[in-house]
Image: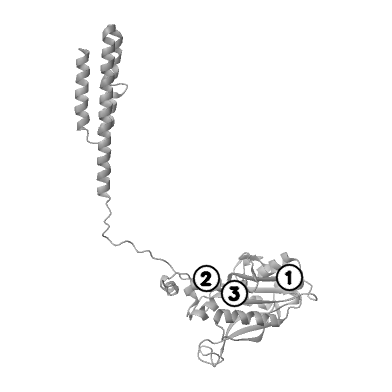
Amino acid sequence: MQNEKIKAILEEGLKQIEKAENLDDINELRNRYLGKKSELASMGSIIATLPVEEKKTFGQEMNETKTTLANAIDERMNALKAKALEEKLQRETIDISLPGRESNLGARNPFHIVKDEMTEIFLGMGFEVADGPEIETDNYNFELLNIPKDHPARDMQDTFYIDENTLLRTHTSPVQARTMEKAQGKPVRIICPGKTYRRDDDDATHSHQFAQIEGLVIDKNINIGHLKATLELFAKKMFGEKREIRLRSSYFPFTEPSVEVDITCANCGGKGCNMCKGTGYIEILGGGMVHPNVLKMNGYDPEQYSGFAFGIGIERVAILRYGIDDIRKFYNNDVRFLHQFKKKG
């Protein structure tokens, strides 16, 4: 009687397994026929009531039925998984006949092209790169550079103040002061590339944010001839071997004597044209011999040491190099502008 019941469970279970259409159905059937609360599991208690000669046969039939059902469930489950995967692959098929997405590579900003090239030129002359904070103190930005409070030069360097003694640096010269302070009277040969800020109305030739590369050399027996030779070599490396420079007397509070440095016009070769306003030269930077007061305030004996300093606007050099007509193009993130400087091939 019991064997007939086991046989009926097996037949019904195999039919239901064959009909299962998805993984949820299969899991439900596994619980119904093989779970702890299944009919087969409940029949296990009958074994204890059977005669000894029937217990073995009954137990074997139960185990064989469980094994058959389990194998059938696993087989059906694997088939349904394969079917589900095939359907998913069909839904997600990629049409390889479609054109691929073009990789739109960007281009380097000419600002960075020029900045890196200028840096490499000065590194080749034996300079080292020094860096410093863009948020500076009044002491490093002005006082240690011979620009005391109420000095007229501060009017030309009106900047953004965080509080009375904290500001956005107006030049990279504070890096020179910090380097001299750390050097403790030893020779220095550095360049200081970086962003600077001044309160200005933005237009084609002015920006409240711009960048400089400043240079500083301090050692014994340094004279203005060393400054001229350094800048002349830079001009030839940057703009071509035919370019010449000239020094004009000027004024900066942190250098004495001070000079403006001009370069022969690329358009006319120094003959005079509309671009250079008939002079044959275009101004590119300023510099001079480090003021004795600056040397003293930063730990040097001006009787023993001398030095020169210069400052070059990175955007100005890029404008001259590439003929750019508006300084704001460096910062507007217009890819049409940048793609002009994309390398071919």
Residue 291: where, in percent of width, then height?
Answer: 73, 77
Mark 3 is surrounded, within 10 Å at the Cα level, by few (under 14), some (14 to 19) or many (20 or more) other residues, namely some
Residue 6 at least partly seen: yes
Q: How far apart are marks 3 and 1 (CA)?
A: 20 Å
Q: Which of marks 3 and 1 is in front?
A: 3
Q: Is residue 339 left or right of residue 181?
A: left
Q: Residue 30 placed where, x, y %?
A: 28, 28
Location of mark 3 (residue): 121
Residue behind mark 1: 187
Disc on the earlier residue, 1 or 2:
2
Q: How far apart are marks 1 and 2 (CA)?
A: 29 Å
Residue located farthest toward the right when viewing the structure as drawn: 303
Q: What's the CA distance linking mark 2 and mark 3?
A: 14 Å
Circle nearer the viewer, 1 or 2: 1
- Where is the C terminus found, in terms of image quarters? bottom left
Q: How far across and how far down the image is residue 37, in percent?
A: 30, 21
Disc 2 target residue: 112
Q: In this view, does 175 lie above or below 248?
A: above
Q: Is mark 2 on a helix, strand or loop?
A: helix
Residue 116, located in which quarter of the rendered image?
bottom right
Callout 3: helix, strand or loop? Answer: helix
Tell me which amino acid carries mark 2.
Answer: His
Nearest to the observer: residue 196 or residue 216: 216
Q: Which of marks 2 and 3 is nearer the N terminus?
A: 2
On screen, 177 above or below 325?
above
CB under 8 Å between callouts 1 and 2? no
